[in-house]
Amino acid sequence: MTAPSPRAVTISAIAAEAGVSAPTVSRVLNGRGDVAPATRERIEQLLRTHGYQRRGARQGERIGLLDLVFNDLDSPWAVEIIRGVEDAAHASGTGTVVSAIHRRASSTRQWLANIRSRASDGAILVTTDLDSPLHAELRELHVPAVVIDPAGVPGLDVPTIGATNWAGGLSATEHLIGLGHRRIGFVAGRPELWCSRARLDGYRAGLETAGLAVEAELIAPGEFDYESGFRAAERLLVLDEPPTAVFAASDQMALGVHEALRRRGLRAPEEVSVVGFDDLPEARWSSPPLTTVRQPMAEMGRLAVRTVQRLVRGEAIESPRVELATELVVRDSTGPPAR
């Protein structure tokens, strides 16, 4: 017996093959949680096997909807990306659906089930890996994807949009060296992320170019959040010879460094200079205003929308990998080291 074509398969056919009711299949398609895990997995497998798509989601038919997917939404950085995506999507009459998958396979599966249910013209994934299975499923659903700030070096034929993280790390380090600092601490981001490694490499390159040693004790781990920046600064400030400046790989971590200095009665920049990375809105309102490396996050979001829309229309894109320029923004948190 010949299997039904992807266009002919119905919810009732999927339900019959899975041995469940049609409403149960509908609950899976709508991302409802009231389905047993084993049943959900069996239904999702059948949906993939038959290439099921919601009526009206045929290849070449535009829905006017884009999916924007984050690992987490608990950062002002994510808000800036969303702002850029919304600007470009609204200007083109396109709606957006924002999701967070929290680095869980179950959340990713539920997101894919949601796309099968409501359809989507394209997907923008932020700071995540688009691995081969996920890429294959999106292709089966005819959903082109773009990755913003990829977690690792992209190995798939998927366009990526990022910033010049290495150059930004270098410029921040050179700025501090130019002010006269020779012991410069670094608060790193999560090591599995490409942007974290690039910023760290830029820091190292700045030191090496100036003839300064890269000292392991001056590099503290962080998680791109306020608390980890605070903990890292506490670790650096108790060294026998603490740094006279600290470069944190994100503004949130830099603000955590500010708080650690405040609690110890130290002033920036008089006693310790501080540099961040991102140029979030709160950077300019911190006390003192934060010197930082600006990355054009909103523009990254706008470019991602334009890129995925070109893919939806079947148009060629200029480059599979785009890096937008970073810029050092000097404010009041950096100055020469104390004599």
Image (cartoon, rainbow, N blue to C red):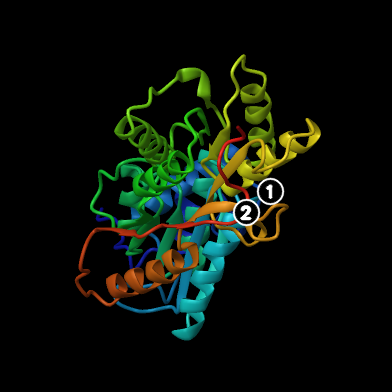
* Vertical placement of residue 292 versus 226, above or below: below
In contact (CB < 8 Å): disc 1 and disc 2: no
- Mark 2 surroundings: few (<14), some (14-19) or many (≥20) residues within 10 A: some
What's the residue type where badge 2 is placed?
Answer: Asp
Name the residue tied to disc 2: 332
Query: At numbered mark 2, what does the secondary structure look like: helix, strand or loop?
Result: loop
- Residue underneath mark 1: 34
Compared to residue 46, the image places residue 60 above or below, namely below
**Residue 19 visible in the snapshot:** no
Q: CA distance from mark 1 to mark 2?
A: 54 Å
Task: State the residue at coordinates (23%, 53%).
Answer: 157
Point out which mark residue 272 bears.
none
The mark that comes first in sequence, 1 or 2, is: 1
Element at badge 1? loop
Residue 27: percent from left, percent from top: 61, 57
The nearer-to-camera label among 1 and 2 is 2
Residue under the image location 41 percent in, 35 percent down: 200
Q: Residue at x 50, y 47 (%)?
A: 108
Asked if 34 appears above or below 118 in the picture, the reply is above
Q: Give how far across and how far down residue 268 sits, in percent.
A: 67, 43
- Whether residue 291 is visible to the viewer of this picture, yes or no, is yes
Q: Position of residue 48 (x, y in %)?
A: 38, 51
**Observer-nearest of 246 and 156:** 246
At label 1, the amino acid type is Asp
User: In the displayed structure, does residue 317 sit left or right of residue 203?
Assistant: left
The answer to whether residue 33 is left or right of residue 190 is right
Q: Quadrant of residue 327?
A: bottom left
